[in-house]
């Protein structure tokens, strides 16, 4: 059995797999089940200051090659997260009778204005997350809010500085958009502004799927972020670029479905591996399976400690 | 690793026929091999409007039916559609009511739950099951599927209750069920209806030593086990994937069962 434990910004993870934001993250019960199924950590659905409706259905669909979604960041707001999701998750995390540090919970926060991020940062820190992930890169709310902050270096820097100025007790990571000319440059700018790490990447696009019989786009929002197997090579390259540009810890996310995919992401520079669309293909039980596959790969290749492979691609 | 080939794009299907069941309820007939089992559901895309989950009311391999109540919103838009208009269908999804050849089944339907229960009955009679079809409603005008059930043959007995006594037994269907279970040997009780009603049905069945399976009705957004909107407290199991059909014994002690469900943003809404 290889050592799959990872320290990410000084937060300990039992294994490198993390539930990505937006999937199965509505309730504490759901997050706890994902941990039970094998995830090393979980990320909440992105939390707003106020309730946010999101888009009507259809909001997602998949094929064997890709997945596309435009959920539109539906959420009940910080009040529910603070009254329910965090207390329930943090309370019930340790198995009875054992004083273990529970699987880390990453709080994803989202706002439509830079100012809102400041107020939200103060409130989310009080909820007791292990890490705060700043989502400035969702591609499927552009009609509502315009270009994501992660696509404009000055905006990304402003949000990073503001949130870092408000949160002192836990690491702050920035979720980057791949839909930019140079993700390395944006990452470097955020790193200089104080980011402790990154989640790379959010979904691609937006893209569009047209039902030719209906003669209309399937998604109600017409366009949505693309994820799944087809984007993996792009995401691996993006993680490679961010790691080269900053050397900071990265949750490598995008198209990872198997243990070997996860290993590949780590070789590109990821310390943790985020999975979301994987749940569509393998269910949340897939987390435990991916961890087993990573362990098998390590055994077969004489890797005793998973840390050995992080960022080995030069 | 074995990644199943899975395409969840909708299939565009013309509405073959619209049958009016009562003032507020229509059955939509589609000519298509759906391959569903009783209790499973589909996601129906009403183009340009929304997409919602509906239980399958009948599926013989040539056509399937969806019985839908006009509750406003997107169903109001559906009710404006005509035969020949196209909707998108994804599925079938979720778990089914499972039974063995020759079983003696009690099917307990509340309100619109009669449609999926009819689906069970129509399959069960093919497998030489004896079926007690029990349907409850507030009054006789809201009873669904009773005529169709009578057409399923002599292996199906129909039991009716109404709150106001306008048809059948005056009172709740759970009372009719309890009397039946005390008299007859029933292998399984299946129920579909409002959650609080199913909770009572499960309690009556288990008290008589009979297993009960019900159809969890939660807010389902994606239908494919990804979004987490239908996760049930406190186990986190998904109504769309681990359900909708679940064993009453497995859900009866869950903190949200019979007490609340969640809305589209994930906030608790208590039943009352």
Image: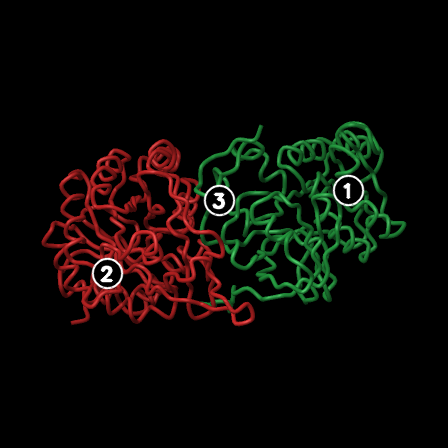
Chain colours: A red, B green
Between marks 2 and 3, how big is the CA–CA gap? Answer: 30 Å
Residue B66: x, y in percent?
68, 54
Above or below: residue A257 compared with residue B159: below
Neighbours of disc 2 within 10 Å: few (<14), some (14-19), many (20+):
many
Q: Nearer the viewer, residue B13 or A36?
A: B13
- Chain of residue at mark 2: A
* B165 relative to B244 in the view: left or right: right
Label 1 residue SS: strand
Residue name at image x 52 percent, y 53 percent: B50
**Residue that carries the numbered disc 3 in the rendered image:** B231
Residue B115 in view (yes/no): yes
Mark count: 3
Q: Nearer the viewer, residue A60 or B188?
A: A60
Q: Nearer the N terminus, badge 1 or badge 3? A: 1
Residue name at image x 60 percent, y 61 percent: B87
Q: Are marks 1 and 3 on the same chain?
A: yes
Residue B39: x, y in percent?
66, 51
Asked whether disc 1 touches disc 3, contact meaning CB atoms under 8 Å apart, the reply is no
Residue name at image x 46 percent, y 59 percent: A60
Residue A23: x, y in percent?
40, 52
Q: Which of B50 and B159 is in front in this view?
A: B50
Please name which of the two marks, 2 or 3, marks the residue nearer to the observer: 3
Question: Dividing the picture into quarters, in which one does residue A224 lie?
Answer: bottom left
**Residue that carries the numbered disc 1 in the rendered image:** B106
Residue name at image x 18 percent, y 67 percent: A182
**Residue that carries the numbered disc 2 in the rendered image:** A270
Label 3 residue SS: loop
Residue A3 in view (yes/no): no
């Amino acid at each position: 059995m290889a050592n799959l434990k990872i320290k990410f910004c000084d937060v300990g993870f039992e294994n490198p797999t993390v539930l990505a934001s937006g999937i199965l993250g509505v309730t504490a019960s759901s997050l706890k089940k994902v941990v039970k199924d094998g995830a090393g950590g979980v990320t909440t659905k992105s939390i707003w200051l106020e309730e946010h409706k999101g888009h009507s259905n259809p909001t997602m669909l998949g094929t064997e090659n890709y997945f596309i979604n435009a959920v539109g960041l539906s959420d009940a707001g910080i009040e529910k997260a603070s009254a329910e999701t965090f207390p329930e998750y943090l309370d019930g995390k340790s198995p009875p009778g054992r004083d273990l540090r529970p699987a880390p919970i990453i709080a994803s926060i989202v706002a439509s204005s830079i100012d809102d991020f400041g107020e939200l940062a103060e409130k989310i820190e009080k909820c007791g997350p292990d890490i705060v992930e700043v989502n400035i890169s969702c591609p499927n709310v552009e009609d509502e809010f315009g270009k994501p902050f992660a696509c404009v270096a000055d905006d990304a820097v402003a949000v990073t500085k503001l949130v870092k100025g408000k949160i002192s007790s836990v690491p702050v990571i920035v979720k980057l958009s791949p839909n930019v000319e140079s993700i390395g440059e944006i990452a470097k700018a955020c790193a200089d502004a104080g980011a402790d790490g990154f989640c790379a990447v959010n979904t691609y696009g937006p893209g569009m799927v047209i039902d030719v019989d209906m003669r209309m786009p399937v998604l109600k929002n017409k366009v949505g972020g693309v994820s799944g197997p087809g984007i993996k090579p792009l995401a691996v390259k993006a993680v490679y670029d961010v790691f080269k540009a900053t050397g900071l810890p990265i949750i490598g996310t995008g198209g990872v479905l198997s243990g070997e995919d996860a290993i590949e992401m780590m070789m590109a520079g990821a310390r943790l591996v985020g999975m979301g669309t994987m749940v569509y293909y393998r269910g949340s039980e897939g987390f435990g399976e991916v961890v087993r596959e990573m362990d098998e790969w390590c055994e077969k290749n004489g890797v005793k400690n998973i840390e050995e492979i992080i960022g080995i691609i030069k | 690793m074995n990644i199943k080939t899975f395409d969840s794009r909708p299939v565009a299907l013309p509405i073959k026929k619209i049958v009016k069941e009562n003032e507020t309820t229509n059955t939509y007939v589609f000519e298509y091999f759906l391959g569903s089992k009783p209790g499973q559901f589909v996601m129906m895309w009403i183009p340009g409007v929304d997409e919602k989950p509906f239980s399958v009311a009948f599926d013989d391999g040539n056509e399937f039916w969806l019985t839908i109540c006009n509750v406003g919103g997107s169903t109001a838009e559906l009710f404006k559609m005509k035969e020949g208009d196209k909707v998108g269908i994804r599925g079938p999804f979720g778990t089914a009511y499972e039974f063995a050849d020759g079983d003696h089944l009690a099917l307990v339907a509340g309100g619109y739950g009669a449609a999926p229960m009819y689906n069970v009955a129509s399959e069960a009679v093919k497998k030489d099951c004896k079926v007690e079809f029990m349907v409850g409603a507030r009054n006789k005008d809201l009873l669904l599927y009773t005529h169709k059930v009578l057409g399923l043959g002599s292996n199906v007995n129909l039991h009716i209750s109404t709150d106001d006594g306008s048809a059948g037994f005056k009172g709740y269907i759970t009372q009719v069920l309890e009397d039946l279970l005390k008299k007859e040997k029933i292998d399984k009780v299946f129920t579909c209806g409002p959650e609080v009603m199913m909770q009572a049905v499960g309690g009556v069945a288990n008290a008589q030593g009979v297993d009960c399976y019900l159809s969890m009705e939660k807010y389902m957004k994606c239908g494919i086990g990804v979004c987490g909107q239908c996760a049930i407290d406190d186990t986190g199991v998904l109504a769309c994937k681990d359900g909708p059909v679940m064993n009453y014994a497995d859900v009866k002690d869950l903190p949200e069962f019979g007490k609340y469900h969640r809305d589209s943003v994930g906030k608790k809404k208590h039943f009352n």
